[in-house]
Image (cartoon, helix red, strand yellow):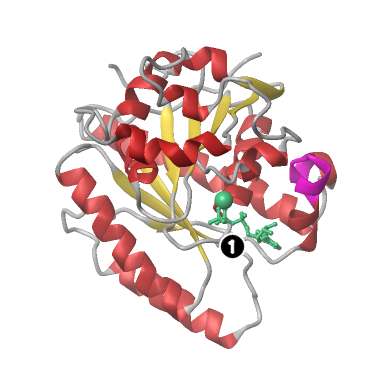
Amino acid sequence: MSATTPATRTVALLNQKGGVGKTTTTVNLGAALAESGLRTLLVDLDPQSNLSLHFGVETDEGRPSTSSLFADPPATAWDCVVEARPGLSFIPADTELALVEGELAGRPDVQSVLRNALAPLHTRFDCILLDCPPGLGVLSVNALTAANEVIVPMQAHYLALRGLEKLLETVQLVAAGLNPQLVCSGVILCMHETLSSHGKAVVEEIHSHLESFRGTDVPWRHCQLLQPPIRRNIKLAEAPSFGKTIFDYDSKCPGAEDYRRVAQSIVAMWKGQQEQAVQESAPPLPLPATSTG
Ligand SMILES: Nc1ncnc2c1ncn2[C@@H]1O[C@H](COP(=O)(O)OP(=O)(O)OP(=O)(O)O)[C@@H](O)[C@H]1O
Ligand SMILES: [Mg+2]
């Protein structure tokens, strides 16, 4: 692969804690990346199907879904893809996905089923965002095996910081075995209370925690606290009830503004990584090409 070869960024949006903003971030970050010209695929890996509901898709409608990718034999990934908007597609989930854990037991490829299933889509998409369920079960491990990188949506709370440390240890375990290229590239603060003094103290602590690993060889040594934090904004909670992304629902509200800006930060981070890889003449990290149409 050359530095100019378009390749697909596969990003796991992961946090073992529930209700921290994983799905809201997958949908709206994905929509912002699509708006910026990247061909984007979202994969719903949660049996709650919340991502699918953001696009007005009810579960269990008999359509091919994420659980079809885990079937033996699996469905063809392209048959599971639903185009939501120009440049923005998703693979819906259904409640069957809850059974996958048991069904995969005993299969030799238990942790790499998703990676193998998504591989044929790499020529079709510049980035693939994986909306992980809460917890660190077999679906999350499949996401970590399929991904190049992890972005952690979290709140600026003390206990969330302790959770982050545990999550990074899991990333390290997967990077040490199943997926050596895996890195944790960013943390996105969600539902952020900009004025809370506790929040400010925790932001400072996250920052110095990440800084303390620069120059080491852990998979989060380059991890950034992505800017800006996503402010608490009721429009982000309202949009899914209309089956809309924040850009379709209210493209000028603070939530839309924050997700647009954080998408710009991520694209800039990817470009910086690629430039650095070229300078170091190391095999380049994949950078999605901007689609022209
Ligand atoms: N910035 C925000 N402002 C206001 N509400 C938000 C914001 N981000 C998320 N929410 C709301 O918080 C709730 C939890 O968010 P979300 O579903 O994205 O979390 P999650 O981590 O995916 O949860 P789960 O672990 O259950 O999958 C949802 O009701 C969502 O609409
Ligand atoms: Mg979710």
Observer-nearest of 49 and 34: 49
The type of residue carrying mark 1 is Cys
Q: Decide whether residue 141 is among the magenta residues.
A: no
- What residue is disc 1 on? 190
Q: Residues within 10 Å of mark 1 (few under 14, many from 20)?
A: many
Q: Is residue 219 visible?
A: no
Q: Is residue 131 above or below residue 163?
A: above
Does the closest atom of ligand 1 sit within 8 Å of the Cβ of label 1?
yes
Disc 1 is placed on an element classified as loop
Please say whether residue 245 is one of the residues in the magenta stretch. Answer: yes
Look at 44% across and 80% down and name the residue there. Answer: 158
For residue 171, above or below residue 126: below
Residue 52 seen? yes
Q: Quadrant of ligand 1?
A: bottom right
Location of the N terminus by quadrant is top left
**Viewport quadrant of the C terminus:** top right
Q: Looking at this view, is 5 or 47 the one in front?
A: 47
x 28%, y 41%: residue: 182
x and y, in percent, of residue 81 in the image: 58, 20
Please name the residue shown 24% across and 37% down the image. Answer: 181
* Quadrant of res 106: top left
Q: Which residues are magenta?
A: 239-247
The prevailing secondary structure element of the residues shown in magenta is helix
| Quadrant in the picture for residue 281 | top left
